[in-house]
Image (cartoon, rainbow, N blue to C red):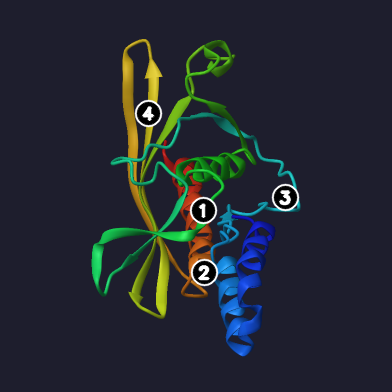
């Protein structure tokens, strides 16, 4: 019911009780309050978060030879808990096994996509990063006519972990696998498990987002260093 319709109805009902004096006025006020409370509340839009704009200044180009091209696969999420845009947290002091979503906070895209986007930006600073499975001719090294190495990631944990109601960290855990494809098939070159946590500046969704962003950047730096160490 609209406010105008409600007021018209109240006015129609109030005509017979105008002679009632103060009681009539009190009844009229109660009817008006009831009509206003029946109106639907304006929905609250959830806050939308991502990892931020990244570096605003392009790092200087070094004179060293660029690293060999790398194919980057989509980031997997075993179990499906991270296949949505929810900002998740755990209460370790109550039930660490239960993932809980913030009701008024969302990622702009699923965390696995945010992580892959950030990783591609970081790796592209000193090598060509290709999309796995697209453009076989483009994905081949022109000098050796072989496919470049492929990096596969599985995101296993991406949540804000509360040790106490006032203390939490952003926890990122993933597994990185580097493989090489040749005429003989697929060859495992190296694999690494990465776990990073960073303190949250506040015990809310905004603090969790900042902590998870910092933990993701640290994990990406560790991956980049590891890739350079694999022969």
- Which label lies toward us, 3 or 2? 2
Q: Secondary structure at mark 3?
A: loop
Q: Counting residues from the N terminus, which is met first, the one under dot 3 or under dot 2?
A: 3
86 over 39 or under it: above or below: above
Q: Residue 85, image x and y in percent?
A: 47, 47
The residue singled out by tag 2 in the image is 207
The residue singled out by tag 3 in the image is 59
Q: Residues within 10 Å of mark 3 (few under 14, many from 20)?
A: few
Q: Counting residues from the N terminus, which is met first, the one under dot 4 or under dot 3?
A: 3
- Which label lies toward us, 1 or 3? 1
Foreground residue among 44 and 67: 44
The residues bearing labels 2 and 1 have C-alpha atoms spaced at a distance of 13 Å
The residues bearing labels 1 and 4 have C-alpha atoms spaced at a distance of 34 Å
The residues bearing labels 4 and 3 have C-alpha atoms spaced at a distance of 29 Å
The residues bearing labels 3 and 2 have C-alpha atoms spaced at a distance of 28 Å
Q: Are marks 4 and 3 in contact (CB under 8 Å)?
A: no
Q: Are marks 1 and 3 in contact (CB under 8 Å)?
A: no
Q: Residues within 10 Å of mark 1 (few under 14, many from 20)?
A: many
Q: Counting residues from the N terminus, which is met first, the one under dot 1 or under dot 4?
A: 1
Q: Which mark is residue 124?
A: none
Q: Secondary structure at mark 2?
A: helix
Foreground residue among 97 and 124: 97
Q: Residue at x 42, y 69 (%)?
A: 169
Q: Residues within 10 Å of mark 2 (few under 14, many from 20)?
A: some
Q: Is residue 136 left or right of residue 53?
A: left
The residue singled out by tag 4 in the image is 179
- Image quadrant occupied by the N terminus: bottom right
The residue singled out by tag 1 in the image is 106
Q: Is residue 56 left or right of residue 201?
A: right
């Amino acid at each position: 019911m609209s406010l105008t319709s409600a007021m018209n109805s109240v006015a129609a009902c109030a005509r017979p009780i105008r002679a009632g004096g103060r009681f009539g006025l009190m009844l009229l006020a109660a009817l008006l309050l009831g009509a206003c409370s029946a109106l639907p509340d304006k929905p609250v839009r959830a806050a939308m978060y991502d990892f931020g704009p990244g570096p605003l200044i392009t790092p200087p180009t070094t004179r060293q030879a660029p690293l060999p091209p790398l194919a980057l696969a989509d980031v997997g999420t075993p179990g499906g808990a991270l296949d949505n845009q929810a900002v998740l947290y755990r209460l370790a002091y109550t039930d660490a096994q239960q993932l809980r979503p913030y009701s008024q906070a969302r990622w702009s895209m699923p965390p696995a996509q945010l992580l892959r986007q950030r990783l591609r930006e970081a790796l592209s600073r000193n090598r060509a990063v290709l999309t796995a499975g697209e453009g076989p001719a483009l994905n081949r090294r022109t000098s050796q006519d072989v496919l470049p190495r492929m990096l596969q990631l599985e995101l296993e944990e991406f949540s804000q972990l509360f040790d106490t109601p006032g203390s939490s960290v952003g926890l990122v855990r993933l597994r990185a696998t580097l493989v090489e494809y040749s005429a003989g098939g697929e060859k495992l070159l190296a694999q690494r498990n990465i776990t990073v946590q960073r303190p949250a500046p506040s015990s809310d969704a905004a603090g969790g987002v900042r902590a998870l962003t910092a933990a993701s950047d640290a994990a990406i730096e560790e991956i980049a260093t590891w890739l350079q160490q694999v022969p």
